[in-house]
Amino acid sequence: METATITEPIVVHSIINGEKVKSEKQFPRENPTRPNEIVCYAPINTREDTIRAIDAAYNAVSEWKWTPVEDRIARMRKAIDKMKSATPEIARLLSLEHGKPLYDAEGEIAVSLMWMEFACDHVKEVVQGEVREHDKGKTIISQDPIGVVSAITPWNYPISLSTIKIAPALLTGNTMVLKPSPYAPLAVSKVVEIIASEFPPGVLNIVHGEADVGVELTSNEKVAKIAFTGGTNTAKHIMKAASETIKKMTLELGGNDAAIILKSFDVNDERAMRRLVISNFLTAGQICMIAKRVYVHRSIYKEFVDKYIEAANKWIRIGDPFNPDVTIGPVNNKKQVEYVQSLIDDAKKRGAEVIKLGRIIDEDVFGQGYFMQPTLVLGCDYGDPIVVEEQFGPTVPVLPFDDEEQVIQLHNESIYGLTSSVWGDEEEAVRVARQIEAGTTMINTAAIQGLDVQFPFGGVKQSGVGREYGVEGIKTYTETHVINIPTELELPYIPE
């Protein structure tokens, strides 16, 4: 069995105007399974580097936007083929730097490729425009490129949350500068290198770095659109920075997604219970659309908890991400471990019961890395921090409710509204779902298991602005341009 180790750190490069660029300063990214090992060194780009990347994208867009869409699609399909061939290598790099099990890393790449292929298949219907003839003449409506897009992406799903932006942006004639998270810079840089090699210099650039890089990407006057996935608080700063030049934005932000278990839910349905466990703990709970709080009808609460623990103990196996028996690896970074643990400790102080779930495969490996054994938290109050805050880690509170009106209110009180799920009889579940404030609600499934790239994805309230995926997610990288050709040129009466 291969283990999550690396013999020599990899040096990551930025790509600016088609060239790999070194940086005088670098930052290390440790292996979260064995933090004393360095997986890679990524550049710390300067503000000047970032300006060069933006300028390269700005200069490239004047020609790229006129490139026939068929050519853009052909280039993207070549990149897709290269990514497919490189999937084993990319997945290995992702597991090493991130900590997610190899099957999970491969799954992220598969979702990314699925979306890229969908975007290739559907971009023509977005950009072809339309001609409307009417009694006053003719109107041409086109969907034109916006210009330079700056993309800022997080560490939890670095490849899929980058390609979700790259594919529609480039296919619709825009150029891009992308900044990934320092907690997962390696695999996404490999993916960007593959994609960028199929496009003209300057069309796709990648920079790494600290706050000054992000500030430039969100305030530079040559940037026309910002595509950001990350925390709500960071998004507030981005919106302020972008306000001076009124940039277009797509923001996919935090969530505190709830799973509502109706009294009609069959607690003896092992497959459904397994889906629920996975929706809580896949990628060690570090997914924006994971089910982070569970509300269960009081009439089935006790039996539900017993069956949930039974299902969790069967599926959850914690250890080395390269062990094929492992389902959950380490948390990505020490800071996140400390935050999640603080929520658990606070719940204990408030009188909650914390139940450890699953099996640790290798105690020695577990003791070395940023591992946390998943936990179920019972006996919380509805307003406790572990319930109302986004944990983003392997713990989940389960709380009882008495009726639909109460649980809908509990759900909608949150400042967030990314995804949600309702479990039980389909007709009853849909009735409840229609009253929920969320961008997406899934029935009898949740999180990645219920994701479909054909349909728009995004949040309401403080969970975001705009939509990604689906045809709508492609269109958001275009501007609507209306050309009116009137046949009757005499104006209505205007006083002289």
Image (cartoon, grey):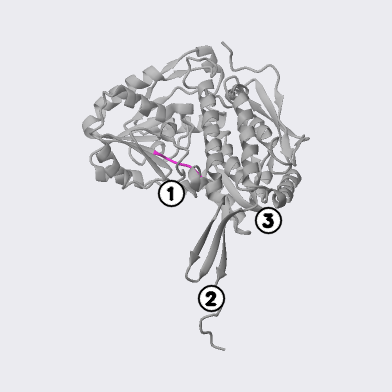
Query: Which residue is disc 2 drawn over?
Result: 488
Q: What element carries label 2?
A: loop
**Number of callouts:** 3
- Residue 460's disc number: 1
Q: Cα distance, mark 3 to mark 1?
A: 28 Å
Image-quadrant location for residue 425: top left
Horizontal relation, residue 396 to residue 470: left or right: left
Image-quadrant location for residue 157: top right
Amino acid type indicated by mark 3 = Glu
**What residue appears at the point 68 percent right and 56 percent down from the top-left corner?**
221
Q: Where is residue 227 in the image (x, y as percent from the top left)?
A: 58, 46
**Could you say which is closer to the camera, residue 472 or residue 440?**
472
N-terminal-most mark, 1 or 2: 1
Q: What element carries label 3?
A: loop
N-terminal-most mark, 3 or 1: 3
- When the figure is inspected, residue 228 is found, relative to residue 352, above or below; the finding is below
**What residue appears at the point 53 percent right and 32 percent down from the top-left corner?**
336
Q: Is mark 1 on a helix, strand or loop?
A: loop
Amino acid type indicated by mark 1 = Val
N-terminal-most mark, 3 or 2: 3
Quarter placement of the C terminus: bottom right
Q: Cα distance, mark 3 to mark 2?
A: 40 Å
Please say whether residue 17 is one of the residues in the magenta stretch.
no
Quarter placement of the N terminus: top right
Q: In the displayed orientation, state which residue is furthest to the bottom.
A: 496
Query: Which residue is disc 3 drawn over?
Result: 221
Please say whether residue 254 is one of the residues in the magenta stretch.
yes
Q: Cα distance, mark 1 to mark 2?
A: 44 Å
User: Could you classify mark 1 by the number of other residues whose Cα lies within 10 Å: few (under 14), some (14-19), or many (20 or more)?
Assistant: many
Identify the magenta region.
Answer: 252-257
- Residue 368's disc number: none
User: Could you classify mark 2 by the number of other residues whose Cα lies within 10 Å: few (under 14), some (14-19), or many (20 or more)?
Assistant: few
